[in-house]
């Protein structure tokens, strides 16, 4: 069964004019290791929603902050505030600067 994540991914891939072989690999990866192995070796193809299948509109949710306590050198609490909204949030910094943990 195709879930709403796969439907959304399929919509975005088709809108970007991604070739069918690449679409199949991405959808297979969403289904799991066996489906991906089958897509890679050519013994199977992943499920695709039928064009007339009803689509569900995903509920949008956005992170506003991450709070981490006592993990990999982080003491009592570290907070990363995020601007909520659509798009991509990138946490970038030099190696050893504390992106994964804080020393």
Image (cartoon, grey):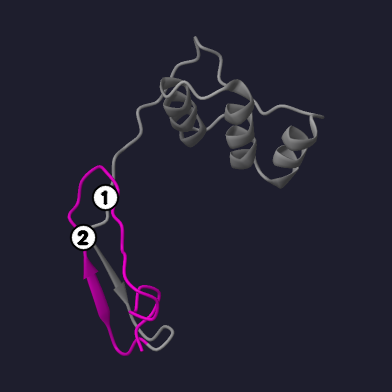
Is the C terminus in the top left, top right, bottom left or bottom right quadrant? bottom left
For mark 1, what is the residue? 62
Q: Is-magenta flag for residue 81?
A: yes
Q: Earlier in the sequence, mark 2 or mark 1?
A: 1
> Which residue is located at x 59 percent, y 40 percent?
30
Instruction: For residue 1, say whether it is visible.
Output: no
The residue tagged with tag 1: helix, strand or loop?
Answer: loop
- The quadrant where residue 101 appears: bottom left
Mark linked to residue 44 = none
Mark linked to residue 82 = 2
| Residue furthest top in the image | 52
Is the N terminus in the top left, top right, bottom left or bottom right quadrant? top right
Q: Which residues are magenta?
A: 74-103
Looking at the rendered image, the disc whose residue lies closer to the viewer, 2 or 1, is 2
> Which residue is located at x 51 percent, y 33 percent?
6
Query: Is the residue under label 1 in contact with that under label 2 (CB below 8 Å)?
Result: yes
Q: Position of residue 100 (x, y in %)?
A: 40, 74
Q: Is-magenta flag for residue 69?
A: no
Q: Is residue 99 above or below residue 76?
A: above
């Amino acid at each position: 069964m195709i879930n709403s994540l796969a439907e959304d991914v399929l919509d975005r891939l088709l809108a970007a004019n991604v070739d069918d072989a690449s679409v199949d690999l991405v959808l297979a990866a969403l289904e799991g290791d066996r489906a991906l192995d089958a897509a890679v070796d050519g013994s199977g193809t992943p499920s695709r929603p039928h064009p007339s299948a009803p689509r569900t509109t995903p509920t949008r949710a956005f992170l506003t902050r991450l709070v981490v306590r006592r993990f990999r050198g982080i003491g009592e609490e570290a907070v990363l505030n995020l601007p909520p909204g659509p798009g991509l949030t990138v946490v970038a910094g030099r190696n050893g600067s504390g992106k994964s943990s804080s020393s």
